[in-house]
Structure formats: C-alpha cells, structure tokens
Image: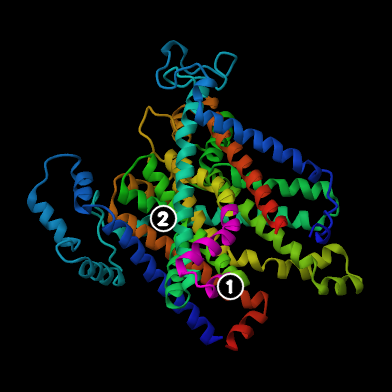
Amino acid sequence: MTALRPPVRPAGRLAALARPATLVAALAVAVVLLWALAPGLFTGHDPVTGVPAERLQAPGAAHWFGTDHLGRDLYARTVHGTSLSVRAALLAIAVALVAGSAVGLVAGFTGGPVDEALMRGTDVLLAIPGLLLSLAVVTALGFGTVKVAIAVGVASVATFARVMRTQVLRVRHATYVEAARLAGAGRAAVLLRHVLPNAAGPVLALAAVELGAVILAVSALSFLGYGATPPTPEWGSLVAEGRDYLAVAWWYSTLPGLVVAVFVLAVGVLGRALAREGRTDR
Amino acid sequence: MAAYVLRRVGGAVGVLWAAFTVSYLILYLLPSDPVAIMLDQGAGGERVDPARVAELRERYGFDQGPVQQYLTLLGRALTGDLGTSISSGAPVAGLIADALPQTAQLAGLALVLGLAGGTAIAGLASWTRAAWLRDLLLLLPPLGVAVPGFWVGLVLLHLFSFTWFVFPAVGNEGFSALVLPAVTLAVGLSAVVAQVLAQGLREAWRAPYVEVAFAKGAGRGRVLAAHVARNGSLPTVTVLGVLVGNLLGGTVVVETVFSRQGFGRLVENAVTTQDIPVVQGLVVVAAAVFVTTSLLADLAHPLLDPRVTTARGAR
C-alpha cells in the first residue's frame, strides 16, 4: 500500500527540524527514565541530608542546580525525586487505561441501554474539571503519592473510555469479527482475541499523548502538598519548597520546575510522533 | 428554536444532578468512615465527644442507609443548602458565594488574555504565507501546554515582583495584583485555544467558498476575516465550556502560588482539611460553571452557523 500514501507535505525550513526534534526528545526521555531507574549513577550527593554550611548556594560546578535551605544538593533531589514522580504518572496512566478501556469495550460491544448508561456516566465525569475531580478523590482517599496517582487516573478514565468505544464500534462489524462469531467463538473470546487487539492502537497512542498531561497533574497535586511527605523529594513538592526562597534563591523552584517542563515537552513530542506513526501505518 | 433551547437546558440540569451524584459517590461512599475523617480534622486529634459523633452522623444522614442519606442531601441541595463546613461551621453556599467574585475577576481576565493570545497566534499563523513564521508560531502551543502552571507563576513572581518590583507578589488588592495570576492562567489557555483554532482555520481554508471569495478578488486578509474566521472558530466555541472549567481548576494552583483569596484557595483549604461538604459544594459549583458556559456556547452556535439550529430542529 506504500504507493498509495500521499506525498510528504512540502515543509518549511523549521519543519525540517521535526526529525531531529524527535531524536532530542527521545534522548531527554531516556535520560529521565535512567534517573528514575538508577539515580545513584547520576549524582553522588545525598538527596535527604544536606551540608548546613553550604545552604542556598547558587548553581555551579559543585552543585549543578544549587542547594536548598538545608544545604541539600537540588540536582540530587531532582534526580532522586524522578522515580516517585514518573512511577506515579505511569500508575495514573495505567488506572485510566485499564478502567477506561474496560468501560469503552463493554459499552461499544454491548450497545443498547448499557452503552447509553456508560456514556452518560462519562459525560458527567467530563463535566467536572479534571483537577477538581482528582482533588475530590484525594479528599476521600487521603494523601500520598499512590493515592494522588489513582486520583489523577480517575480523572482521565472518561477520555479513554470514549476513544476505546469509538474503536470498538469501528471494528465490531468488521468481516473477521463476524467470521469469528459465525465460526462459533464465544463473546468473550471474540472480544479479547479479535476486537481488543484491533481497537488498541489509537487507545495506546492516546496513552502516550496523555502522559504529559498526567505528569503535570501529578506534579500539581504534589505541589499543593498532597503527595509524598517531606523530606522525600518529588518533582512538584520540590518546586513548592522553593516558594519561600523565591526572593533569595531563584534556582530553588526554577530548575526542578524546568526539568518537569522539559520532560513533559519531550514526552509530548514523542507521543505525537508515535501517534503520527500509528496513523500512517494504517 | 424554543424547543432546542429547552432541550439543552434540560440536558444541563441533568448533568448537574449527575455531578452531585458522582461527587456524593466519591466523597461519602468511598472513605471507610467519613465521620471519622470529619472529626479527625475538626477536633485536631483531641479525644472526641461521642455525643458530637452522634450529632454529625445525624446531621449528614449517616444513621440512615446510603439511599436515604443521598436523598436527604439532594433535597437540601435543591433548596440551595449545600451543608456546613466541618472546619469552620459556616454554610458552604455562603463560603462559595464569598469566594466566587474574586475568582470571577481573575478567570475573566485570564479568559480575555488567553483568547486574545491564542487568536493572535493561530490567526497570524493562518494568515502568513511565510512558512518559517508559521512553523515558529505553531511551536508555541506545545510549549505552552507543557509548562506547569505553578512553575510559570513562580517564575513570573520571581521576575516581576522580586527582581523588577513591577507587580505585588501577594494579595487581592486592585488590578495590579490581578495581572500576574491572570497571565499565568492565560499561558496554558492560550496554547489550547491556539491549537484548536489553528486546526479549525486550516480546515476552513480548504472550503470551496474560499476559492469563490478569491475569485471575486478578495485579498488574503479579507478572506480570513470575513469567511475563514467565522467557520474556523466553531470548534473553539464548542470547547469553551471545557476551557472555562479547566480555568477554574487552574485557579487552585494559581491562587495558592499568589496567596489570593477565592474559589481555588477555598478548594485547596477544603481538600487539605478533608472538609467533605465544602469539597462537594465546590465540585457541584464547578460543574455548574462548566454546564452554563457550554450551554451559552451551544446557544451561540446558531449565530455563527445557521445550519446548526435547522439541522437539529428538524429532528
């Protein structure tokens, strides 16, 4: 089918950077994932106990991101906080992906009043601003990184359910699905073996695109103080700790926050590249 | 038209009722013992009087079954009684009514700035024929979506309040205290507006009436202003409800960063103290704002595109 593909859009000079941009983004994401997996490889400083004599030092060769009010190395705290923040984001995506896909699968495959009821339910979830929905869940569950992750995941369930349902409706009456049914396969078998694999592509692409938003939401809740308890470092809470030292130590909030921004941007570039790839494959 | 409006208003009321139900399910049924949470926060860890436990159970209907309790709370909400705050004892409806004007100013200014910024980016990118300028402009929205709101706020605070002393760092006093928080909220908003609007304009440029307009001798600017903008902005109007809802969510972070009083600060306080009735009231009010904005946007739709009413009215 290659010959039928539309010709590549004649792009401007900056669009020619699209490929290198994807590469740089991939590199940034890879570095952050390595921070999460093996923080000890990237910094020798202790993230929790500081050197009081070195408090509030500006960034330099000894401390790349400077130090905080207890003399702790901020680069070390950022690197060690990565694992908790990234795992929370992945857990949130997993919650949204699994719960949302289940709702979408059942709604799309069953149809009728069940479909109607489930979709009205997602309408309601979409009517409550995402952050407020997460905060309501946090109020009920209590504080902590895992609870924050679940709360953020719950807020994205409706979006995933929608996309999954659309995909299921697309493949539900495809010839191979009808054939499997005629051949005597049970409903569950048809659903899991034939419908799910063929509907999964765009849903997984959505997961890649949503990851950035989820990281921002997890960081925001952590910034508000609903995540890990001090002194455990987390991306959002690191930025929050720097609030009181804004006038004297610009690096304290700025540099950890910059890491979040760069990572979200990189994840977004990669996610969109993956989604594009998925579209042209079909 | 009357039937269309009536149907939309009915739908909006339905969503509002459902939002109350969802928040009830989350806040009252999810915790193992909401009364314990309420008392724990209210008493600050002191020993709790059993009489007070019984009183709270009765007031919030925990001595009844979940269905009965839900109906009791819903009945009160219908009369405008959203319960009382656990931590302060004040009526929830009053707390929210006091907080909303401050936040309405903030969100209003942010909405104006965000729409203006997003329209400027998308409009210029759509109008220009210089590929480099278009690509450069369209790099901005992904950037605006990626930066955390709390971080933008702190950076602005650092630059404009602590380095150049242009705007006050905290407080609700006057217009100058409103600028930085509004700009912070507008960054994310304008990025989303620019993305949706640019997409809409791109599709509108391909329509046959654009060729007709060019054939009749109109210039690029005139075609954009008179023909493309009108149809290309429809998707943006459609998502206006979501945008305003998110703006309200964003005030939680921004009002905390700038130490402003308002809706967002009330949310932050209520969640921190696990003040369940207040959180539920805030969620319902946020849903009401979303539903009202969406309704207004829907009603504005036929003004921009006359086909909308006739198509749906024919059903």
Determine if residue B165 is in view.
Answer: no
Residue underneath mark 2: A133
Front one among A26 and B286 = A26
Disc 1 marks a residue whose amino acid type is Ala
Check the picture and name the quadrant holding the N terminus of chain B.
bottom right
Q: How many marks?
A: 2
> Within 10 Å of the Cα at label 1, are there few (<14), some (14-19), or many (20+) other Cα atoms?
few
Q: Can I make out residue A82 in this image?
A: yes
Q: Position of residue A42 (x, y in %)?
A: 55, 21
Tell me, yes or no, whether the highlighted magenta stretch contains residue A190: yes
The region drawn magenta spans A177-205
Does mark 2 fall on the same chain as mark 1? yes
Q: Main secondary structure of the magenta part?
A: helix
* Parent chain of label 1: A
Q: State the image coordinates of residue A111 (x, y, percent, origin top left).
A: 48, 75
In the rendered structure, which disc, 1 or 2, sits on the residue that comes first in sequence? Answer: 2
What amino acid is at disc 2? Leu
Seen at 45% across and 74% down, the residue is A116
Color scheme of the displayed model: rainbow
**Are the residues flagged by discs 1 and 2 in contact, CB closer than 8 Å?**
no
In the image, taking residue A50 as reference, residue A6 lies left or right, namely right
What mark, if any, has residue A179 been given in the picture?
1
The vertical placement of A9 against A261, above or below, is below
Quarter location, residue A34: top right
Q: Is A25 left, or right, of A1 in this rendering?
A: left
B224, above or below B138, in the image:
below
Residue A143, percent from left and from top: 33, 42
* Label 2 neighbour load within 10 Å: few <14, some 14-19, many 20+: many
Q: CA distance from mark 1 to mark 2?
A: 42 Å
Q: Quadrant of residue B163?
A: top right
Where's residue A255, x and y in %? 56, 29
